Amino acid sequence: MSRLDEVGRADAWRCWLCDEPVDPEMSVNDARGPSIDSVTTKAKAKGVGSVAGSQRLAHRACNTKKGAIAPVVPWSADLFVVDPAPILATLERLARKSGREIMARCPTRADADQAATWLADRVTRLTPDLDLATEVESGGGQFLLVLRTPSR
């Protein structure tokens, strides 16, 4: 078994950056083909470790694009969220210091619940070893989507 197959199976053949399926049969030279991303972050460089693990599956284009800029994990276009927080930066902070982060605001409870379900699934796949919980809090006529580490 090749290293690409191992990483692909571990990530269920989904790109860790865009969360879209990766075709294992596609050429590695194709923009949508599979590639292994050696995840490096500021936290890893400081010896804290990597939020997403040392190697993740990515489309070749997604992997190449993040080479010049910090990677961005997009929020789903199907969600109604206002002022969404950057997911990777938030996960890195919570991995380092624990606590609570407001991830977005939503106009209705249903929107917030949908976003919380999506976010819980997404962060579980991004950081399987980090114990996180999503919560919805009401206040000021809106609903806040909160990501937190369990109380210690």
Image (spheres, rainbow, N blue to C red):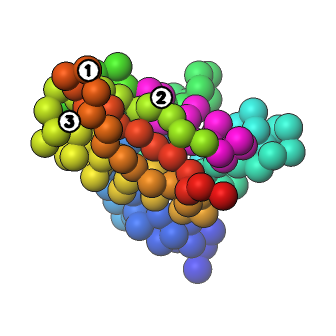
Tell me which segment is drawn in magenta. Answer: 85-98
Q: What is the number of the mark on residue 140?
A: 1
Which residue does the image show at 60% across and 63% down from the upper left?
129
Instruction: Determine the CA span between mark 3 and mark 1.
Output: 20 Å
Helix, strand or loop under label 2: loop
Helix, strand or loop under label 3: loop
State the residue position of label 2: 86
The answer to whether the residues at label 3 and label 2 have Cβ atoms under 8 Å apart is no
Give the vertical position of 139 relative to 13 (above or below): above
Q: Is residue 55 visible?
A: no
Q: Is residue 74 magenta?
A: no
Query: Which quadrant of the rendered structure holds the N terminus?
Result: bottom right
Of all residues, the one furthest to the front in this rendering is 139
The answer to whether the residues at label 2 and label 1 have Cβ atoms under 8 Å apart is no
Q: Nearer the viewer, residue 35 or 111?
A: 111
Q: Position of residue 87 (x, y in %)?
A: 48, 36
The answer to whether the residues at label 3 and label 1 have Cβ atoms under 8 Å apart is no
